[in-house]
């Protein structure tokens, strides 16, 4: 008797579990949840499930929609606009009770487009009841019925917050090609964690096979938010920053779109946001970490919302002499070992050191790569000796000998924890086999 009932019992347990899992799957499907009744079942009406959505009957693309509480709760849609194909655009937006409105859209093309045909842009809609809107579409028609045939974007930042899930988030603009610089990536991520960063956002077009493992690990760990960025499915993105030199449709795989999107994405989520590249570390030199640095800077400069940090090049071609960080367990890991590159290029007369940014996202309207384009508060240039960027890469002044470079071993101050955390992460990512 007991033997016969056992399989039945197992079957019941399995079906109950399956039921729970399926229910969770469907109730967790938030797009369906908030899809208003009259759109249900319609094949042509859906929320766009992608991070890039064509605006129908146009050459333009839309990315994400936000309420901007600073400008009368207008709807701001981060978009990619083809500059030579401007046409009247409208927002059609609806609340959760299915009440829809239209408003004429104001297209603001960012001034930094570097000559490319497509540019990072804001499509702004200031109309009645935008504060209650739950989803929006950009349309070439002002007829409200057009909403039935448009792709819809959910509207984010519907409520403001004054306390944040994160104190420091880093926005890394984009990954593309077969980028597989694992060692520098893991060292940089672990360095950021030691400096007080809790959240990193990365826009992924593609990457190499080993870096993929590391990204999956960080995603699982929870520190890394990966935004799919299949820009190459829609445009011919440029691998460079200048249209005349590099050609293509859009600056650097859409870097400017990513940076702006990331600011709004983090506006009520993170106290500060760092805008820098994957191979750059914004390093405090007089404080133990970023919270202590920003506490002092913000106290001294209360009205500042944008802090500019100088970039400095540490050539990957110059190795420190002792070889103490030439660690056997890292020899099979692809990429640059930043701990071996402690020689910093000197400033050049009449050459400007580019800067990257630490911002209060609530004070920024539009950003470029090395400065913001529009902001509310003041801008402050952080002195070199307080903080500068450690940027290990190919030299800019490749003719200089080691003796002509400055020694800067700041990364070594974190040596013990950094090495141990890097090794743990490489192991957890299945990139490093434990040998002992
Ligand atoms: C709006 O579009 C609907 C559906 O295509 C159409 O029936 C209606 O006549 C249009 N209204 C106007 C004012 O053009
Ligand atoms: C952010 O900083 C505050 C003040 O130092 C601290 O109380 C809080 O725990 C920090 N939040 C996170 C997510 O670390
Ligand atoms: C990054 O994008 C590529 C191409 O779509 C994809 O194959 C890969 O799985 C993505 N990686 C992560 C970690 O999301
Ligand atoms: C690191 O050590 C290995 C093994 O001793 C050696 O082959 C390699 O040249 C060293 N690398 C550097 C940059 O010194």
Image: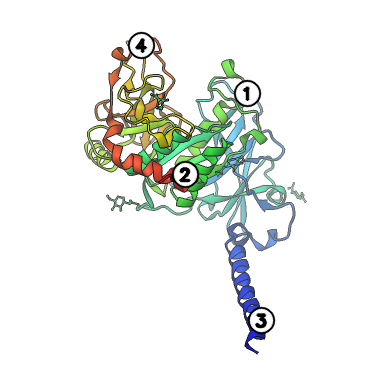
Q: Earlier in the sequence, mark 1 or mark 3?
A: 3
Q: Secondary structure at mark 3?
A: helix
User: Do the CB atoms of the residues marked 4 and 3 lie less than 8 Å apart?
Assistant: no
Q: Earlier in the sequence, mark 4 or mark 2?
A: 4
User: Do the CB atoms of the residues marked 2 and 3 lie less than 8 Å apart?
Assistant: no
Q: Earlier in the sequence, mark 2 or mark 3?
A: 3
**Residue on which the image places disc 3:** 8
Q: CA gap, disc 2 to disc 1? A: 42 Å
User: Do the CB atoms of the residues marked 4 and 2 lie less than 8 Å apart?
Assistant: no
Q: Quadrant of ligand 3?
A: top right
**Residue on which the image places disc 4:** 400
- The residue located at (62%, 77%) in the rendering is 10
Quarter of the picture holding the N terminus: bottom right
Q: CA gap, disc 4 to disc 3? A: 77 Å
User: Do the CB atoms of the residues marked 1 and 3 lie less than 8 Å apart?
Assistant: no
Q: Secondary structure at mark 2?
A: loop
Q: Which callout, 2 or 1, points to the residue nearer the camera?
A: 2
Q: Earlier in the sequence, mark 4 or mark 1?
A: 1
Q: Is residue 270 visible?
A: yes
- The residue located at (67%, 36%) in the rendering is 233
**Residue on which the image places disc 1:** 248
């Amino acid at each position: 008797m007991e033997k016969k009932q056992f399989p039945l019992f197992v079957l019941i347990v399995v079906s109950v579990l399956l039921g729970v899992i399926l229910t969770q799957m469907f109730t967790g499907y938030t797009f369906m949840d908030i899809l208003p009744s009259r759109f249900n079942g319609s094949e042509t009406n859906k929320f766009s499930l992608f991070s890039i959505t064509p605006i129908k009957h146009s050459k333009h693309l839309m990315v994400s929609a936000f309420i901007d509480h600073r400008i009368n709760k207008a709807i701001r849609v981060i978009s990619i606009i083809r500059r030579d194909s401007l046409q009247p655009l409208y927002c059609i937006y609806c609340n959760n009770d299915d009440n829809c409105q239209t408003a004429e859209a104001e297209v603001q093309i960012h001034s930094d487009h570097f000559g490319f045909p497509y540019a990072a842009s804001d499509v702004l809609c200031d109309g009645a009841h935008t504060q209650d809107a739950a989803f929006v579409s950009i349309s070439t028609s002002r007829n409200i019925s057009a909403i039935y045939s448009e792709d819809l974007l959910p509207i984010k930042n519907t409520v403001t917050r004054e306390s944040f899930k994160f104190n420091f988030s880093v926005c890394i603009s984009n990954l593309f090609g077969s980028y597989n610089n694992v060692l520098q990536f893991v060292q940089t991520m672990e360095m950021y964690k030691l400096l007080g960063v809790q959240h990193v956002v990365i826009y992924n077009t593609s990457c190499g096979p080993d870096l993929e493992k590391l990204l999956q690990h960080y995603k699982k760990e929870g520190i890394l938010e990966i935004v799919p960025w299949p820009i190459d499915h829609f445009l011919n993105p440029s691998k460079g920053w200048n249209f005349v030199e590099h050609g293509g449709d859009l600056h650097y795989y859409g870097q400017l779109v990513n940076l702006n999107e990331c600011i709004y994405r983090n506006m009520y989520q993170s106290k500060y946001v760092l805008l820098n590249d994957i191979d750059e570390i914004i390093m405090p030199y007089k404080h133990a970490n970023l919270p202590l640095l920003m506490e002092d800077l913000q106290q001294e400069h209360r009205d500042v919302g944008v802090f500019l940090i100088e970039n400095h090049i540490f050539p990957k071609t110059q190795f420190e002499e002792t070889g103490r960080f030439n660690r056997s367990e890292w020899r099979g890991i692809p990429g640059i070992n930043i701990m071996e590159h402690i020689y910093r290029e000197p400033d050049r007369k009449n050459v400007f050191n580019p800067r990257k940014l630490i911002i209060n996202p609530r004070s920024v309207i539009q950003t470029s790569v090395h400065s913001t384009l529009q902001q509310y508060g003041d801008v402050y240039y952080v002195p070199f000796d307080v903080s500068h960027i450690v940027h290990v890469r190919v030299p800019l002044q490749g003719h200089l000998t080691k003796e002509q470079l400055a020694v800067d071993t700041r990364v070594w101050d974190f040596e013990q924890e950094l090495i141990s955390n890097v090794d743990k992460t490489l192991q957890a990512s299945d990139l490093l086999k434990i040998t002992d």
